Image: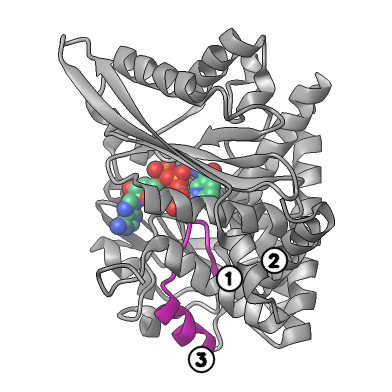
Amino acid sequence: MSESSKPSAFETVNRLFNQAADLLGLSETKRIELTTPYRELMVRLPLLTEQGEVRVFRGYRVQHDNSRGPMKGGIRFHPDADLDEVRALASLMTWKTAVVNLPYGGAKGGIQCNPRELSELDLERLTRRFAQRMEGFIGPREDIPGPDMGTNARVMAWMMDEYSKFHGYSPGVVTGKPLELGGSEGRVSATGRGLFFAVERIAPDIGMELNGARVAVQGFGNVGYWAARFLSDAGCKVVAVSDVEGTLRCADGLDIEALREVAEQKGSVIHYDGADCERLHRDELIASDCDILVPAALGGTIHAGNAGSIRARLIAEGANHPTTPEADGILIERGITVLPDIYANAGGVTVSYFEWVQNLQQQRWDAERVDRELREVMHEAFDALNTAAEEFDVDLRTAAFVVAIRRVAEAARLRGLH
Ligand code: NAD
C-alpha cells in the first residue's frame, strides 16, 4: 500500500490480478515475475517555446511485459500523467492484449503537460524530443506506442517521422497514424465498434433483445459517440447521453448524428433541442432508466456512492477502470452483468494490431475486412471469458484476468525466466 491509505492505481490493478491469481493457485514467485514491470523510463524534456521561454517537462514510458510479443500501449499528454498511473495502465495493457489474444505485451507512456496550452509548433517539438529520448527503446519489434488521451494521428505522424530519422522509414513503430502514412481503415471508430460487438455477443446469453433496448452513454467523445452510433444502428434506443457539461435525457430516444452535430457546433450535448428532453447534472446519467449503461468518460465514475442507483441490466465499460472495486462488489451482488474494460474497450488496440500487421506486410485492408476481423476477435475473446467464468463461477472481470494471466504465465514459462 502507498503512504496514503488510498491504494495507488497500480495497486488497484494488482488487486484484480491477485484475485484471479488466487483462483489459478499462482505461486508468489510467479506473481512477482508477472507484475513487475520490464522497464520504466523517465525522461526530462526541455522545450524552448515559441514565446522564447524554456520549460522542462517529464516524460514516461513503462514497458510492463513482453512475454507474448512486442509491447503495445498509448501515449497520453495530460497534466496528471505520472509514473504510478502510467505503470498501472501499462500493466492493464498486458492483460488487455492477452484477453483478446493479440501477440503483444503491454506498455504505456505519457508526457506531463496540458496540450491545450501548447502551440502546434511547441507540441511538435515536444513530441520529437520525446521520440529522440525513446528511440533506442521502442520499435516495431520492441514497443509500439499509439494515441491516447491528448494525443492523436498528428502526434503519431511526428513520432513516426522522428523515429524514422534514426532507423529508416518505419511506419510500424506507432499505430493510430493518418491513413496517408499507413494508418488503418476503421481505427477511429474501433473502440466503439468493438464495444458494440461485445454487447451484440452477450445479449442473447442474458436474454436481451437489442432491438428496442434502452441505452445510456456517459461521455460523448470518441468512444461514447461511436458506441452510441453502432448501438443505435442495431436498433437500440439511446435515451440518455452525458458529457462534461451535463446529462441529456430523452425517453423517446436520441438521433445520434443530429446530437453529434450539436455537440460539435455548440460544444456540448446539452444544447440538443428535443421536445421531450430534460437536462440534468452530468452525474445523474448513471441512474438513468435504461437496459444498457456505457461508461465512456473517466475512471472511477461508478463508485460505492452510486452503484446502488444503477438501473441497467448490462454495463459495457468503454472507459478504462470506470468502476471502483467497491462498486464492483455491489454490482455483482445486484446481479448486474459487467463487460469489463480490458475486454469491452479492446477494439482500439485490436485495430492498432491490424494496422501494425498491414505495415509489416506492406498491405492495405479495406474497411469491411477490418470490421469482419474485429468482430471475430471480440466474439472469440468473449467465448474464452465465458468459459473461464463458468469454470470458476466468477464474474466476467475476474474471468478476463484469469484468461489473460493464464496466457501470459504460459508464454513466460515457455520462454524461461530471464
Ligand atoms: P474523449 O476525450 O474523446 O471523450 C471523453 C468524453 O467524456 C467527452 O465527451 C467529455 O466531455 C466527457 N466527460 C469528461 N468528464 C466527464 C464527466 N465527469 N461526466 C460525463 N462526461 C465526461 O475520450 P475517449 O477517447 O472517448 O476516451 C474515453 C475513455 O475511454 C477514457 O477512459 C479512455 O481511456 C478510454 N479508452 C479510449 C480508447 C480510444 O480508442 N479512444 C480506447 C480504450 C479506452
Please count the marks in the image. 3
Query: Residue drawn 67% across and 16% down?
Result: 170
**Callout in the foreground (1, 3):** 1
Q: How far apart are marks 2 and 1 (CA)?
A: 8 Å
**Depth check: 94 or 195 in front?**
94
Asked if residue 191 is positioned above or below residue 385 in the image, the reply reads: above
Task: Answer with the quarter of the image where residue 275 lies.
Answer: bottom left
Q: Type of residue at label 3?
A: Glu
Q: Type of residue at label 1?
A: Phe
**Which element is circle 1 on?**
helix
Q: Would residue 293 be seen by someone viewing this image from the given angle? A: no
Mark drawn on residue 17:
1
Mark drawn on residue 405:
2
Task: Answer with the quarter of the image where residue 19 lies.
Answer: bottom right
Query: Residue drawn 45% across and 23% down?
Result: 133
Badges 2 and 1: C-beta atoms under 8 Å apart? Answer: yes
Q: Which sits earlier in the primary sequence, circle 3 or circle 2?
A: 3
What residue is pinned by disc 3? 333
Asked if residue 395 is positioned above or below residue 409 in the image, the reply reads: below
Query: Residue drawn 62% across and 33% down?
Result: 144
Q: Which sits earlier in the primary sequence, circle 1 or circle 3?
A: 1
**Depth check: 174 or 222 in front?**
174
x, y percent for residue 95 = 63, 58
**Which element is circle 2 on?**
helix
Q: Is residue 76 left or right of residue 278?
A: right
Asked if residue 321 is positioned above or below residue 114 in the image, the reply reads: below
Question: For the residue carrying disc 1, how many other residues have a C-alpha within 10 Å: few (<14), some (14-19), or many (20+)?
Answer: many
Quadrant containing the N terminus is bottom left
Q: In this view, does 110 lie to the left or right of 45?
A: right
